[in-house]
Image (tube, rainbow, N blue to C red):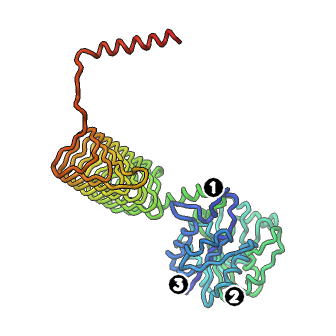
């Protein structure tokens, strides 16, 4: 049975009280994307396109965001078995297998999903994903006989000998869709927590003489997120995955551990990234780009052969064309820096266009906000903006125009014109010593008074 004939049930109704947050647990982000979206993306990568997401009542107003997937609300949180029952009551799995996964276990790989599905197809009614954590602790244990799975026992209900078993239950399983409904309906809640455990499906299947099997996954991909510490552990794992993937694709990370990537960060080839660089959502980097480190990017596009940093910030809407240079302590927001243009140090360029080959001097500011409106600055091709220029938007600086250092540009500057706004300089010769003597006397006088 191909993956396309497998439907998924994603359990996402957990309260997440240990997160200590107003945000539902499954909506906390990992590499810039909610946990539940990581799970759905993993299913899609495995070829599973149909899923039912089981949500808690507090997420009833967010069902539309999961389209085209189905959603159901588990109004009473009575355990994993009850959550699956709610999903099956709403949507008939028909002839499909049913894969049950968890929204707070977002690191499950495509390879492991496919291995579990393949194990199920070997004439079994149920296949369970197990793993071997360093500390089995409160995990349920898989009771096996040879390559067959006999039952799953929760840690709270396990005997001393059963607690010695190292093979643990991840919670992930796949079962025959036609039979799963009957087994779920037969679940009892006669346990220490008074919940309906999905794990007891295995014992019910074995009682019906159905074959149950298991396969093992890696510990790192089965990290469950219950609190902020777990979230940090998962972030570290996913970052290492992303770093390894981009380096394998031709990106140099000078200090991989200090570079943080987003789920959708895109690189061309032969990109060099310096240390302590953060890529937020929506960043696209071309080829042969040099990023000198200590930079922060978000919803920005960097063209081929651009040079950025160190200590640069590209905010949403920043676009660098081929060969653009952005230097240290420069912030770009909603602005296009055209081919070969340079903004090399200590400047803010927002709501602007910097034309091809233009040069923006140190300390330049585009004054784009008047307290009510954002206005645009347009700097023409080949223009030269002097250091400490303030461009009061809306304003245009023409092609080839020049602004003098310290100029405040309030009116449009024509092509090839020079704009200056400085007052005439006066030199008062021979007065410096007298000035210093006066200041010294005042300081000494103040010291005596105190």
Numbered mark located on residue 32 in the image: none
Image x and y of residue 171, in percent: 67, 71
Image x and y of residue 155, in percent: 77, 65
Q: Secondary structure at mark 3?
A: helix
Write down the residue under mark 1.
228
Image vertical order of residue 406 relative to residue 46, above or below? above
Q: How would you rate the neighbour count of disc 3 (Cα within 10 Å): few for under 14, some for 14-19, many for 20 or more? A: some
Numbered mark located on residue 4 in the image: 3
Q: Give me the residue at 39% from left, 63% from top.
A: 266
Q: Is residue 11 left or right of residue 66?
A: right
Image x and y of residue 386, in percent: 25, 42
Write down the residue under mark 2.
179
Q: Give me the residue at 75% from left, 77% from top.
A: 200
Give the quadrant of the N terminus.
bottom right
Image vertical order of residue 223 relative to residue 175, above or below? above
Image vertical order of residue 321 relative to residue 53, above or below? above
Q: Where is residue 434, by image quadrant?
A: top left
Q: CA distance from mark 1 to mark 2?
A: 38 Å
Q: Where is residue 60, by image quadrant?
A: bottom right
Q: Nearer the viewer, residue 308 or 232?
A: 308
Image vertical order of residue 417 relative to residue 119, above or below? above
Q: Secondary structure at mark 2?
A: helix
Which residue is the extreme one toward the top? 448
Q: Is residue 347 left or right of residue 117?
A: left
Q: Give me the residue at 41% from left, 47% from top.
A: 294
Q: Nearer the viewer, residue 220 or 52?
A: 52
Q: Confirm whether residue 143 shows in the render.
A: no
Q: Give me the residue at 43% from left, 57% from top.
A: 298
Q: Is residue 32 left or right of residue 331?
A: right
Q: Nearer the viewer, residue 433 or 340?
A: 433
């Amino acid at each position: 049975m191909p993956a396309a004939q497998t439907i998924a049930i994603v359990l996402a109704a957990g309260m997440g009280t240990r997160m200590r947050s107003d945000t539902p647990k499954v909506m906390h982000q990992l590499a810039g994307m909610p946990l539940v979206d990581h799970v759905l993306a993993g299913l899609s990568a495995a070829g599973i396109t149909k899923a039912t997401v089981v949500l808690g009542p507090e997420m009833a107003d967010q069902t539309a965001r999961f389209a085209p997937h189905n959603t159901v609300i588990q109004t009473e949180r009575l355990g994993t078995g009850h959550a699956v029952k709610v999903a099956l009551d709403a949507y008939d799995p028909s002839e499909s297998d049913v894969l049950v996964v968890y929204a707070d276990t977002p690191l499950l790989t495509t390879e492991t999903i496919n291995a579990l599905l393949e194990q199920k197809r070997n004439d079994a009614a149920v296949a369970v994903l197990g793993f071997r954590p360093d500390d089995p602790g409160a995990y349920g244990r898989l009771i096996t006989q040879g390559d067959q799975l006999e039952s799953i026992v929760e840690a709270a209900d396990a005997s001393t000998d059963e607690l010695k078993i190292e093979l643990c239950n991840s919670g992930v399983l796949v079962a025959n869709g036609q039979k799963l409904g009957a087994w779920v309906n037969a679940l009892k809640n006669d346990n220490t927590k008074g919940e309906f455990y999905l794990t007891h499906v295995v014992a019910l299947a074995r009682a019906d003489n159905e074959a149950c099997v298991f396969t093992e996954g890696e510990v790192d991909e089965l990290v469950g997120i219950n609190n902020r510490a777990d979230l940090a552990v998962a972030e570290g794992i996913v970052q290492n995955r992303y770093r390894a993937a981009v380096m394998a694709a031709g990106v140099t990370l000078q200090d991989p551990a200090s570079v943080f990537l987003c789920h959708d960060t895109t690189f061309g080839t032969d990109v060099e990234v310096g240390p302590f660089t953060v890529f937020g959502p929506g960043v696209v980097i071309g080829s042969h780009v040099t990023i000198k480190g200590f930079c922060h990017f978000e919803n920005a596009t960097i063209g081929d052969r651009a040079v950025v940093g160190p200590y640069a910030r590209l905010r949403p809407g920043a676009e660098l064309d081929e060969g653009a240079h952005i230097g240290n302590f420069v912030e770009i927001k909603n602005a296009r820096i055209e081919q070969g243009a340079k903004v090399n140090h200590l400047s803010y360029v927002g709501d602007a266009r910097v034309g091809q080959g233009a040069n923006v001097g140190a300390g330049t500011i585009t004054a784009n906000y008047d307290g009510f409106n954002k206005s645009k600055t347009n700097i023409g091709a080949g223009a030269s903006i002097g250091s400490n220029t303030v461009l009061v938007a809306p304003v245009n600086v023409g092609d080839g125009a020049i602004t003098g250092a310290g100029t405040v540009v309030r009116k449009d500057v024509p092509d090839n014109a020079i704009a200056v706004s400085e007052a005439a300089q006066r030199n008062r010769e021979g007065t410096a010593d007298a000035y210093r003597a006066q200041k010294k006397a005042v300081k000494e006088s103040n010291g005596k008074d105190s």
